[in-house]
């Protein structure tokens, strides 16, 4: 990776084993540079599809039931027929892992599009066959340097959409608005974009869910205009299980600037501290003790 990608919130530790990992495409396996879908695939033409990111930790697919529930709910919402039930699809993931001899430290991107179209248009009735299923399994560990120093966020002018515009509970292939937000952040020297909702309250980051800590209270958005994050839900539950307070509420940038600590959550990164927002230090400008406590709870749950 280049130095620039090593500072990304989505960065990871490079692993040469990935050069030999084969990619699953519709039941067959191909080398990375030979894995392809047709140019008329609806995922390529329109971003018409849904996806999931999963982790394999010590032989266990983390939160696989929750991931499948989210995937099938999204597919049902857009009337995409995956062509197999949840158990069958999970078995295809395991088949991919067995094929590549993978047992631990793996991040999996499961991508499903509506399938190949007879012509590039929006109408789903022009599909010519079954859904396209791609499974990319890679050895991935979060960037330890980035976790140690914390993320720098910049508030984007691009807003998170409301469900009547585009429901972010759908893990859609289309991510152009988030890419736009991230480009703004990158151009301003930040690692990730902080995004507001349509009323100006803090909603999410472009690829992760956002939390602030005030005292020992954990604050996050209501969830109306952010990703339906599985790690987000687990962190909320873990902190509540300790008897501590979690507030899912509307809150402002000013309240974020005044937070004692902040962090983001995601499938690959787990818990990543945030140490700067819009050029302002968060707390002391270092990863804080409460964030560390929450990260320890999450690590114990994961079994890393």
Image: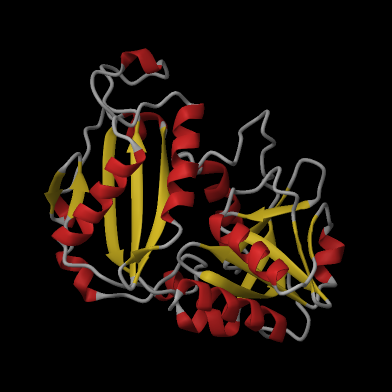
Relative to residue 171, is residue 261 drawn left or right? Answer: right
* Front residue of this view, candidates 97 and 113: 97
Q: Is residue 185 visible?
A: no
Relative to residue 293, is residue 229 drawn left or right? Answer: left
User: Whole-percent x and y of residue 226?
Assistant: 65, 48
User: Whole-percent x and y of residue 284?
Assistant: 76, 86
User: Whole-percent x and y of residue 250?
Assistant: 83, 52
**Which quarter of the figure is the N terminus placed in?**
bottom left
Which corner quadrant of the image does residue 287 belong to?
A: bottom right
| Above or below, comparing residue 88 to residue 29 in the picture | above
* Front residue of this view, candidates 218 and 204: 218
Identify the residue shown where x is 65% and y is 30%. 165
Which corner quadrant of the image does residue 231 belong to?
A: bottom right
| Above or below, comparing residue 157 to residue 39 in the picture | below
Identify the residue shown where x is 35% and y is 41%. 86
User: Whole-percent x and y of residue 131?
Assistant: 29, 30
* Front residue of this view, candidates 299 and 215: 299
Which corner quadrant of the image does residue 278 belong to?
A: bottom right
């Amino acid at each position: 990776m280049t130095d620039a990608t090593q500072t990304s919130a989505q960065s990871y530790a490079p692993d040469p084993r990935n050069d030999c990992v084969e990619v699953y495409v519709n039941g067959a396996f191909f080398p990375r540079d030979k894995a392809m879908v047709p140019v008329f695939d609806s995922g390529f033409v329109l971003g018409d599809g849904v996806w999931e990111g999963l982790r394999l930790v010590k032989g266990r697919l983390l939160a696989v039931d929750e991931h499948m529930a989210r995937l099938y709910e999204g597919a049902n919402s857009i009337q995409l027929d995956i062509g197999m039930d949840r158990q069958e699809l999970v078995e295809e993931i395991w088949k991919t892992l067995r094929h590549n001899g993978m047992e631990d430290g793996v991040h999996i991107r499961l991508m499903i599009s509506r399938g190949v179209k007879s012509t590039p248009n929006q109408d789903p009735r022009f599909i010519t066959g079954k859904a396209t299923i791609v499974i990319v399994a890679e050895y991935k560990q979060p960037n330890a340097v980035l976790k140690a120093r914390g993320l720098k966020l910049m508030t984007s002018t691009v807003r998170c959409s409301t469900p009547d515009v585009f429901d972010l509970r759908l893990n859609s292939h289309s991510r152009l608005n988030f890419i736009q937000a991230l480009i703004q952040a990158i151009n301003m020297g930040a690692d990730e974009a902080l995004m507001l909702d349509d009323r100006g309250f803090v909603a999410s980051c472009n690829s992760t869910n956002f939390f602030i800590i005030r005292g020992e209270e954990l604050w996050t958005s209501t969830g109306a205009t952010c990703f339906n994050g599985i790690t987000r839900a687990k962190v909320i539950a873990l902190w509540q299980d300790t008897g501590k307070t979690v507030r899912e509420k509307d809150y402002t940038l000013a309240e974020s600037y005044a937070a004692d600590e902040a962090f983001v959550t995601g499938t690959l990164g787990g818990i990543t501290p945030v140490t700067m927002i819009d050029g302002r230090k968060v707390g002391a400008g270092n990863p804080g003790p409460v964030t560390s406590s929450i990260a320890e709870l999450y690590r114990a749950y994961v079994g890393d």
